[in-house]
């Protein structure tokens, strides 16, 4: 257990750390052997350091703890006291959150909420009694550090004499398995690109879903319908990852000493990846979820959502064979494998590619023009109905079968309730939450009940994610009383699934199992689903309740749940300052810049945007006075949940000298100053169907300007087109070919500057 | 002229450096790769080859492949995994069963591992004794082979897998051929005589095509005949006779299933749950 500290992965630090480590280890061993039995205090020392990793052939910055990614597995037995020393050797602050653990609020590890961050060079101690058992995990709750490697397994063992000890399950050979993902883009860049609606990730995944591809697959109508409803190409996940990892490697192995059955303690430490889990050696038996035992249930596969944990029992049918246990990312762009057993490796088939246009069609069906979702009376919950099955070839047939079948569409008459029920549609049994049952009664103690309803909201185009259309910084704390039972009713009215996580408490999921409803601390809610959860409010504190997809959380999808009349947290000496820092995560502005170095001038823009505000400047700079120079600056605010409307104040400046003082006339007969002007304006922009921006602007001299513009029409996987036309009789058409994330070739025709071609650079 | 020769010299120098650098890392290895005969060669080699990185050459007689690869960029492990995912067992990896099933019939080979082990592969936490009891009971019927293969064919149709259906129908035809008449008595003997040729003919038709529509036409006939047989000769296996009213332009279609839940073999995923159970046979 402790020796895992010595597994160093970064060769650069090896020498230096080795000596350090030997000393620490010796000290630790002595200390442990003295105190271990008497007080059951179990100590760990964690050294957090910047490191370089090489997953893809390029060295990249990451964060390692005790020289390893994932962080070391920490093991305790129920009844122990955990004492974890965090040595922050980074150049920035950090924190550690104990995911799914019941503990005093001040040990929960959310910087600026339950403690101040651990500053560089400081040592910080987390100390809490272990009062539960099960598979949990821990991770940094500071910024985007989790994506860089700060995650690890946290195992609480049952005591041997525990009456809940299950023979044949709790005494099996066991392996902690941490699933995660790696991207060569720095997470800050990932976050920025998501907010800038860059489709570079889709391009890397081959999931652009352009018009060209739509026509080839006979789905032009679907694509037009999709853009008519103002949606960008849909996908099941947002980020392209280079590698998927099991315990820090693309492949791993587990060779249990003896016995046919083994138990895997799996935590999904991916920042934004749900994984399909499948096994080449037969069925998978689910025995625990989120650290809580469940009645064994046998399935062919299951999806583990971000931040969930599952304990699975699998059998090794033949002792001369190693069976592949595969974790495939939900978008199916990659996988990681664990080979269980010894011998020749029995593979399992990779999951086939998603049928994106079927998914798009399904999305079109459930999206109303208002941007609300329409469940067509299906009352979906608990992942029992998965709209995504339309995209799964292994369940609904491959795309080419579908094409043949379309000849007689009137035959499509599944009862609506079964159309998306994966377990009714095929012989593959997929786990859903309705199949989980606690072995013990989980009834809450008597007490008053408070009901809280939340609508999960967001929009993909601007990557804003929220609850009831409010981000963390826009909402008050939710106040509850100690001793009452809190019922949470969550409805997902957004287009993505969200694993919602509550700190410090387990909630019961009302899934039809009555008093044996299962306990969880994360629930993955698919679009249009409504789930009901309840928990007993029994521990003071400010507890974070948020979507565990890292980039959703950072954009503000969460709330703080707080107790009335609770004592102050001594670790937060200045609550106002702390709150401001906590809120800064979602208030943060993201930069975007573009410039086209063309033959007829420079076209470009620079923009800063956050949840509601935008500040941007566009420019068209010619190479001589005749072509002229022009800039437009807007400060605007987005309105409404879908943020289709933006109102703004602007400033236009232009200088041009064509020799004659040309004054243009707009289509309303108003004269405008084409050659030399400096005007302020007020206006609004509204996103029309087909994603066309309609902009109306009135200048301080009384002139009007109306404008229609559409950018980034995906013609093929890499070709984008755009156009602009306005009431000053100006127009522009462009085509851009995307080479890399930052570089493209652009050609355009502009009514003022004529034809141009050049290289466009995007940041 | 002079500059040209300079350029050539530099180019030559660079080339030789890169050649030397490359040759240092070229590894050649001989490994076991299973396959039937010459016909598999191209598939094995294509799966393993990687431009400028790995080359595979397979010998059908000895079932060995010679791997030549750049050890900086790839490994024997990676190459053999690709070959296994294309359907060919080898010394490091066994191919997934469903991938093996999809190999062209001529390319099937005797697999090194006995696949019968898979059904035991369930985590033995429950249901075990029950399954064993069922299995014993089923062994007693001489028609079990036919029914098993018929049900496998039906499942292939449910999954819209024409290729698999064709294969399963071939197996079914084989099983029909093997039933000895002595094992059937009285009435069922008579029925068997009546339906045998029809059963065999439909099964053969299905096995000879991969066209799902054509297969389904024959599957309807096959099912009706098998129903007559099962009705006359109880098998001890619970079967559900099920009906889809829409098949064949409203004339309807029938089939037998081992489960009461409807999973429609005439339309597959397109309208999987269309239909109802009309009779339960025991």
Image (tube, coloured by chain):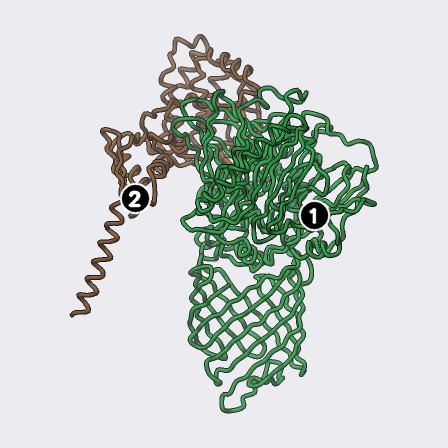
Mark 1: few/some/many CA within 10 Å (<14, 14-19, 20+):
many
Percent of width and height locating residue A569: 76, 46
Please indicate, yes or no, whether residue B274 appears anywhere in the rendered image: no
Percent of width and height locating residue A502: 69, 42
User: The residue tagged with tag 2: helix, strand or loop?
Assistant: strand
Considering only vertical position in the picture, is B135 above or below A36? Answer: above
Q: Colour of chain A?
A: green
- Residue beneath disc 2: B70
The quarter of the picture where residue A588 lies is bottom right
Please state which of residues A412 and B83 is positioned toward the viewer in this rendering.
B83
Considering only vertical position in the picture, is A385 above or below A698? Answer: above
Residue projecting furthest to the left: B1
The chain letter of the brown chain reads B
Separation of marks 2 and 1 at Cα, in angstroms: 53 Å
Considering only vertical position in the picture, is B44 above or below A575? Answer: above
Please state which of residues A582 and A295 is positioned toward the viewer in this rendering.
A582
- Residue beneath disc 1: A115
Of the 4 image quadrants, the one containing the N terminus of chain A is top right
Please indicate, yes or no, whether residue A145 appears anywhere in the rendered image: yes
Label of residue A539 in the image: none
Which residue is pictured at 74% across the width and 41% down the height?
Answer: A488
Percent of width and height locating residue A445: 80, 31
User: The residue tagged with tag 1: helix, strand or loop?
Assistant: loop
Percent of width and height locating residue A252: 46, 35
The quarter of the picture where residue A757 lies is bottom left
Please state which of residues B143 and A330 is positioned toward the viewer in this rendering.
A330
Is B57 displayed left or right of A279 in the figure?
A: left
Subunit under mark 2: B
Mark 2: few/some/many CA within 10 Å (<14, 14-19, 20+):
many
Q: How many marks?
A: 2
Subunit under mark 1: A
In front: label 2 or label 1: 1
């Amino acid at each position: 257990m402790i020796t895992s500290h010595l597994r160093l992965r970064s060769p650069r630090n090896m020498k230096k750390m080795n000596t350090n480590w030997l000393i620490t280890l010796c000290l630790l061993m002595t200390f442990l052997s003295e105190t271990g039995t008497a007080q059951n205090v179990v100590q760990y020392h964690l050294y957090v350091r910047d490191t370089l990793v090489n997953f893809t052939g390029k060295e990249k910055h990451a964060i390692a703890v005790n020289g390893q990614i994932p962080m070391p597995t920490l093991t305790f037995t129920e009844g122990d006291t955990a004492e974890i020393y965090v040595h922050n050797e980074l150049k920035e602050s950090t924190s550690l959150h104990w995911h799914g653990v019941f503990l005093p609020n001040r040990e929960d590890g959310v910087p600026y909420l339950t403690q101040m961050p651990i500053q560089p060079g400081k040592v910080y101690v987390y100390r809490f009694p272990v009062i539960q058992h099960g598979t949990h995990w821990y991770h940094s709750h500071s910024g985007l550090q989790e994506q860089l490697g700060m995650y690890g397994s946290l195992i609480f063992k049952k005591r041997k004499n525990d009456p809940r000890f299950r023979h044949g399950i709790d005494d099996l050979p066991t392996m902690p398995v941490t699933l995660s993902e790696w991207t060569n883009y720095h997470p800050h860049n990932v976050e920025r690109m998501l907010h800038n609606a860059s489709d570079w990730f889709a391009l890397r995944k081959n999931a652009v879903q352009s018009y060209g591809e739509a026509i080839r697959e006979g789905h032009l109508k679907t694509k037009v319908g999709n853009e008519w409803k103002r949606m960008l190409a849909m996908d099941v996940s947002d980020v392209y990852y280079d590698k998927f990892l099991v315990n820090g490697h693309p492949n791993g192995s587990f060779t249990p000493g003896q016995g046919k059955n083994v138990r895997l303690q799996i935590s999904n430490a991916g920042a934004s990846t749900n994984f399909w889990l499948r096994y080449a050696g037969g069925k998978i038996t689910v025995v625990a979820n989120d650290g809580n035992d469940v009645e064994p249930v046998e399935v062919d596969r299951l999806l583990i959502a971000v931040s969930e944990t599952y304990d699975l029992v699998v059998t090794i049918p033949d002792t001369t064979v190693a069976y592949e246990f595969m974790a495939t990312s939900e978008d199916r762009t990659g996988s990681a494998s664990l080979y269980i057993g010894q011998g020749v490796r029995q593979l399992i088939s990779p999951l086939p590619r998603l049928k994106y246009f079927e998914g798009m069609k399904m999305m079109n069906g459930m999206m109303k023009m208002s941007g609300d979702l329409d469940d067509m009376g299906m009352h979906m919950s608990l992942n029992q109905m998965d709209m995504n099955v339309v995209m799964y070839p292994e369940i609904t047939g491959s795309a080419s079968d579908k094409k043949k079948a379309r000849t007689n569409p009137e035959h499509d008459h599944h009862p609506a309730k079964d159309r998306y029920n994966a377990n009714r549609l095929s012989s593959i049994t997929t786990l859903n939450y309705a199949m989980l049952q606690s072995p013990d009664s989980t009834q809450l103690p008597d007490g008053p009940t408070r009901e809280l309803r939340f609508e999960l909201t967001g929009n993909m185009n601007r990557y804003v994610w929220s609850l009831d259309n409010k981000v963390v910084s826009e909402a008050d704390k939710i106040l509850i009383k100690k001793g009452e039972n809190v019922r949470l009713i969550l409805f997902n009215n957004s287009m993505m699934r969200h694993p919602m996580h509550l700190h410090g408490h387990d909630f019961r999921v009302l899934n039809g199992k009555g008093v044996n409803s299962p306990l969880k601390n994360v629930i993955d809610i698919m679009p249009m689903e409504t789930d009901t959860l309840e928990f007993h409010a029994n521990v003071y504190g400010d507890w974070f309740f948020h979507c565990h997809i890292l980039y959703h959380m950072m954009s503000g999808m969460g709330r703080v749940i707080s107790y009335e009349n609770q004592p102050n947290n001594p670790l937060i000496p200045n609550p106002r300052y702390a709150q401001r820092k906590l809120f800064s995560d979602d208030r943060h502005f993201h930069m975007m810049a573009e410039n086209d170095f063309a033959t007829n001038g420079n076209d470009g823009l620079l923009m800063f945007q956050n949840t509601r505000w935008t500040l941007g400047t566009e420019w068209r700079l010619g190479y001589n006075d005749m072509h002229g120079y022009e800039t437009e600056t807007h400060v605007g605010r987005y309105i409404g949940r879908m943020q289709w409307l933006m109102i703004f104040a602007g400033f236009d400046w232009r200088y041009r000298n064509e020799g004659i003082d040309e004054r243009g006339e707009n289509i309303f007969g108003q004269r405008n100053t084409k050659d030399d002007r400096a005007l302020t304006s007020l206006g609004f922009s509204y996103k029309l169907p087909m994603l066309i921006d309609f902009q109306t602007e009135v200048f301080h001299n009384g002139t009007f300007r109306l404008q229609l513009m559409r950018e980034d029409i995906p013609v093929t996987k890499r070709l984008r087109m755009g156009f602009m036309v306005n009431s000053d009789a100006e127009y522009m058409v462009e085509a851009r070919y995307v080479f890399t994330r930052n570089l493209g070739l652009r050609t355009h025709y502009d009514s003022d500057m004529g034809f141009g071609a050049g290289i466009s650079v995007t940041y | 002229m002079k500059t040209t020769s300079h350029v050539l010299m530099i180019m030559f120098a660079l080339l030789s450096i890169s050649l030397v650098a490359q040759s240092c890392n070229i590894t050649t290895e001989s490994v076991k790769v299973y396959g039937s005969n010459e016909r598999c060669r191209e598939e094995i080699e294509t799966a393993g080859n990687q431009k400028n990185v790995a080359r595979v050459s397979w010998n059908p007689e000895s079932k060995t492949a010679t791997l030549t690869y750049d050890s900086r960029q790839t490994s024997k492990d990676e190459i053999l995994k690709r070959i296994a995912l294309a359907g060919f067992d080898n010394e490091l990896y066994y191919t997934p069963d469903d991938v093996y099933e999809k190999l062209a019939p001529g390319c099937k080979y005797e697999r090194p591992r006995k696949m019968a082990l898979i059904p035991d592969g369930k985590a033995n936490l429950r249901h075990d004794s029950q399954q064993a009891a069922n299995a014993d009971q089923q062994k007693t019927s001489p028609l079990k082979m036919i029914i098993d293969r018929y049900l496998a064919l039906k499942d292939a149709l449910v999954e819209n897998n024409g290729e698999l259906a064709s294969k399963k129908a071939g197996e079914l035809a084989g099983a029909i051929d093997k039933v000895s008449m002595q094992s059937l008595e009285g009435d069922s003997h008579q029925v068997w005589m009546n339906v045998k040729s029809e059963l065999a003919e439909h099964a053969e038709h299905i096995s000879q095509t991969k066209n799902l529509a054509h297969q389904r036409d024959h599957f309807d006939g096959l099912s009706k005949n098998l129903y007559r047989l099962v009705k006359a000769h109880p098998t001890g296996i619970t079967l559900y006779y099920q009906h889809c009213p829409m098949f064949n332009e409203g004339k309807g279609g029938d089939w037998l299933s081992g489960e009461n839940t409807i999973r429609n073999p005439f339309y597959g995923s397109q309208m999987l749950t269309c239909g109802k159970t009309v009779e339960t046979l025991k």
